Image (cartoon, grey):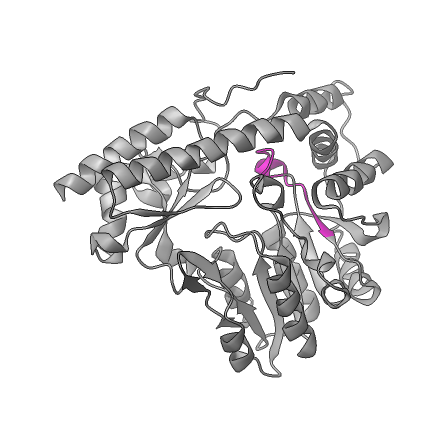
Amino acid sequence: MKQYNFDELIDRHGTNCLKVDALEERFGNPDLVPLWVADMDFRTPDFIVNAIKQRCTHEIFGYTYPSEEYYESIINWVDYKHKWKIRKEWLSYIPGIVKGIAFTLDCFTQPGDKVIIQPPVYHPFRIVPEQMEREVINNPLKLVNGRYEMDFEQLESVIDDKCKVLILCSPHNPGGVVWPKDVLSKLADICAAHNILVISDEIHAEMVYPHSRHTPFPTVSETAAASSITFMAPSKTFNMAGIVSSYAIIPEETIRNKFYSFLQARELNEGTIFAYTATTAAYTYGTEWLQQMRMYIMENVAYVERFMKAELPKIKVYMPEASFLVWLDCRDLKLGQKELVELFRDKAGLALNDGAMFGPGGEGFMRMNIGCPRSVIQDALQALKKAVKSK
């Protein structure tokens, strides 16, 4: 069995890497330690790279279409990971999940309609509807004993006839929550009762830690399956976001026909040669790499938690149940949000995501990407410790 090296330091400068090469533009300092945008600093797995290299040897990159092997790799992977037996006709390539959300809003809503989100949550959930002239309605998550829960009472109080869509983040970003089946089932019942379509963004589903279990939204009940669109992708899991390899799964025929006709009319359902090639390789050969990577990430999370408890007890770690993103509660530092961002950026030399960007409930928090070699995290936390002690 091959052992993968996640301690390897790889210089990403000069590759048009958003995480590194955009630091000057986004943070005003090109020399910050990049712990922000959600891709990893690990080498993309060799079986994906080799599949792309092999395809390149043909030396013609003409028009393409998805092979049976591509569909089978997704179907088999979803069954293996989630015990969900999907069908080929339920599937469609989409050029990115955020784009998929925008396409869904274009297809099923009109300007002025309302879209429900559950902050603090991945910021495009707010930005995309707003830019499309839809009204964003907040259904804020509740913090109960250090864990986020859905507020169904508040949800039902804000729903009216203009509410057409709810965007679900499952697993949750930035909180790292893997939603229990009964919670998703209740959400499905409420939304279906009000004819609200659920868009379930499940891009972090493969990165659920062994002690938790991800439940795809449509599997919780017939009601959920009949009123939802699910988006998945190998991009976060196998560190290939730049290849753009997302896909939609829609069990319900009426929703599926309407949405896939919308995509087809605009040729938005057509992937690239490398999207199909990389996805097939990832889902065919990726089991062992994923297991090793998850264990490394879990050890990174444990390291961050131990360090904060011992050295920076005023910063609390919300222990994630999935993914490589850690939600840091910095409220005990008693800083305003501007001062908090400046502490991390200007005094510690670290580029993290400002918690306020995730909406109500994000103030006083910072999101840290720990999908990198442990030595980077160790150095970053020492710099943060020094900055906090000197403030």
> At x 33% / y 59%, what residue is drawn?
363
Which quarter of the image is occupied by the N terminus? top right
Please say whether residue 241 is one of the residues in the magenta stretch.
yes
- Looking at the image, is 143 positioned above or below residue 21? below
In the rendered image, which quarter contains the C terminus? top left
Q: Is residue 201 above or below residue 198?
A: above
Q: Residue at x 74, y 31 (%)?
A: 277
Frontmost residue, 366 versus 102 = 366
- The answer to whether residue 140 shows anywhere in this view is yes
Relative to 171, is 7 on the left or the right? left
Q: Residue at x 49, y 42 (%)?
A: 38
- Viewer-side residue, 324 vs 315: 315
* Residue 190 rendering spot, x and y as whole percentages: 64, 74
**Relative horizontal placement of residue 269, taking residue 129 as reference (left or right):** right
Determine the residue located farthest toward the bottom in the rendered image. 161
Q: Position of residue 8 (x, y in %)?
A: 46, 19
Q: Residue at x 22, y 58 (%)?
A: 336
User: Magenta stretch?
Assistant: 235-248
Residue 338 rendering spot, x and y as whole percentages: 25, 55
